[in-house]
């Protein structure tokens, strides 16, 4: 167990963030969605409180428990006025350490989760992100969605949930964050009421690395009828947050597609007007990272936009970026950083991200210095060291008529189509 705290007595307010390494990458095959269901079942009944009573107790202290589940972990966020902390800890201790996993509530949650899966299909941008992750991590534990599939949800039993909770909800799995009006006494109160009530457990082995995948472009067309505009995602596996190249690569990616004046935005949006929204980002993970480009061109521009994107990526790897773009990126990152740490909760969130992605906590206060010391050569070397445009994974959510132009893109090694309501792993390559 690791504890990170940000003390600030300006406001009589406390925020708690409990992170557990109990994410969807730990779902057994055929039980995709189990981590998600387990995390959301915790506040649906305890030994002392029904689901309704848990909700009522949280209302009394003016808060709720926000739960988010990803491949690498689960996060529980709660906050309250300092005076309400004892009441919050009373119910939170039951939620975390004494859930009963009521079968009737499990059935309700599975139906609710199924409705959330169906709701996602109304968002083309959401579908592009969903299928891009599936394509990028195909064959790996990171590939299945956190909510699981319709078929896998149906197979999850109470015994599965109990076993997952017993195995993964231990002290060793948690990183705890506390921010606000706190001190040593409150810190101990929080830990005694929450994580310390769990069994000690042991540190789990690292998730196996995500393989690079076969050579050649891998394109997935997600067909959705009557679309005049497509949602496009292009990218590849990248370096993890702990890699020394991560900050230099972040500067390069920001200069390439992270600001309104970046190369990608200028070429796609300003020069050609193919997409109003366009950008590129580098997301850190503990064991891998993700480099992704996204935009939304009209149907007639999709193939051209993709061809240009791949050319720009090849030039980025071979030639790097000019000083003007990298200097602007450094200034942008430095100037935006204060807004990322302007409150105790934001500061805590930044520290937790550093911890969970294997980076030193000192990067918070040394962020500007670290960015400023990234030279042009450092940035260009970092991005070229892992960028492989010829291995790009491409997802296009749009009309089936796009297939004729997409299959003609140079370098396409694998081309597949699935309907927008496809459920389950992707069809074989």
Image (spheres, rainbow, N blue to C red):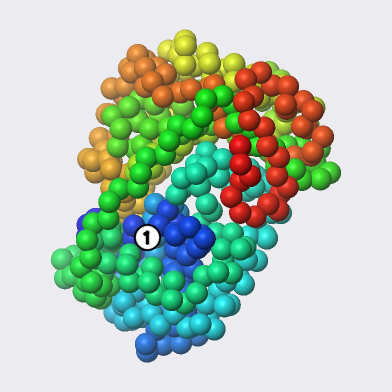
**Percent coordinates x, y for residue 269 in the rendering:** 66, 25
Q: Relative to 204, say whether 253 is above or below.
A: above
Residue 67 visible (yes or no): no
The quadrant of the image that shows the C terminus is top right
* Residue positioned 44% across, 59% down in the render: 27
Helix, strand or loop at label 1? It is loop
Please rate how many residues cluster around mark 1, counting C-alpha atoms within 10 Å: few if below 14, some from 14 to 19, many from 20: many
In the rendered view, does 43 fall on the left or right side of 152?
left
Residue for badge 1: 22
Query: In the picture provided, is 124 more to the left or to the right than 328?
Result: right
In this view, the residue in front, 394 or 32, is: 32
Q: Residue 32, how many percent across, how many down? A: 51, 60
Residue at 47% x, 16% y is: 317
Q: Nearer the viewer, residue 8 or 27?
A: 27
Q: Residue furthest bottom?
A: 48
Instruction: Place residue 21 in its image quadrant.
Output: bottom left
- Would residue 382 be seen by someone viewing this image from the given angle? yes
Left or right of residue 175: residue 219 = right
Q: Which residue is at a point 38% across and 68% down the rendered structure image?
A: 164
Q: Residue at x 34, y 74 (%)?
A: 96
Indicate the position of residue 127 as horizontal and vertical percent values.
64, 47
Q: Is residue 51 above or below residue 70?
A: below
Residue 345, placed above or below residue 257: below
């Amino acid at each position: 167990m690791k504890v990170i705290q940000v003390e600030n007595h300006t406001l009589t307010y406390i925020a708690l963030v409990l992170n557990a390494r109990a994410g969807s990458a730990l779902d057994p095959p055929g039980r995709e969605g189990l981590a998600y269901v387990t995390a959301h079942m915790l506040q649906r009944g305890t030994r002392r409180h029904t689901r309704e009573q848990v909700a009522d107790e949280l209302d009394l202290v003016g808060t709720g428990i926000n739960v988010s589940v990803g491949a690498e972990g689960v996060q529980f966020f709660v906050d309250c006025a300092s005076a309400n902390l004892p009441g919050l800890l009373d119910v939170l201790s039951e939620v975390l350490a004494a859930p009963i996993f009521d079968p009737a509530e499990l059935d309700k949650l599975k139906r609710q989760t199924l409705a959330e899966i169906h709701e996602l299909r109304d968002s083309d941008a959401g579908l592009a992100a969903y299928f891009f992750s599936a394509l990028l991590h195909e064959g790996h534990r990171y590939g299945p969605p956190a909510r699981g599939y319709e078929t896998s949800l149906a197979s999850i039993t109470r015994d599965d949930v109990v076993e997952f909770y017993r195995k993964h909800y231990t002290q060793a799995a948690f990183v705890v964050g506390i921010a606000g009006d706190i001190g040593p006494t409150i810190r101990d109160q929080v830990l005694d009421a929450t994580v310390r009530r769990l069994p000690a457990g042991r540190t789990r082995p690292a998730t196996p690395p995500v393989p690079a995948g076969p050579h050649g472009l891998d394109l997935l067309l997600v067909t959705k009828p009557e679309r005049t505009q497509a949602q496009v995602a292009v990218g590849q596996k990248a370096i993890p947050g702990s890699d020394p190249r991560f900050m230099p690569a972040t500067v390069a990616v920001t200069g390439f597609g992270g600001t309104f004046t970046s190369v990608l935005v200028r070429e796609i949006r300003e020069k050609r007007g193919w997409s109003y929204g366009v950008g590129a980002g580098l997301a850190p993970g503990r064991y891998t990272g993700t480099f992704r480009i996204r935009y939304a061109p009209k149907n007639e521009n999709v193939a051209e936009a993709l061809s240009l994107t791949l050319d720009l990526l090849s030039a980025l790897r071979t030639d790097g970026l000019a000083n003007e773009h990298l200097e602007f990126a450094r200034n942008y990152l430095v100037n935006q950083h204060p807004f990322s740490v302007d409150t105790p909760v934001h500061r805590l969130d930044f520290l937790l991200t550093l911890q969970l992605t294997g980076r030193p906590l000192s990067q918070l206060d040394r962020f500007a210095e670290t960015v400023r010391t990234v030279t042009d050569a450092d940035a260009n070397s970092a991005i070229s060291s892992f960028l492989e445009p010829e291995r790009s994974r491409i997802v296009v959510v749009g009309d089936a008529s796009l297939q004729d132009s997409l299959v003609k893109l140079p370098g396409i090694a694998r081309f597949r189509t699935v309907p927008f309501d496809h459920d389950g792993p992707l069809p074989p390559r």
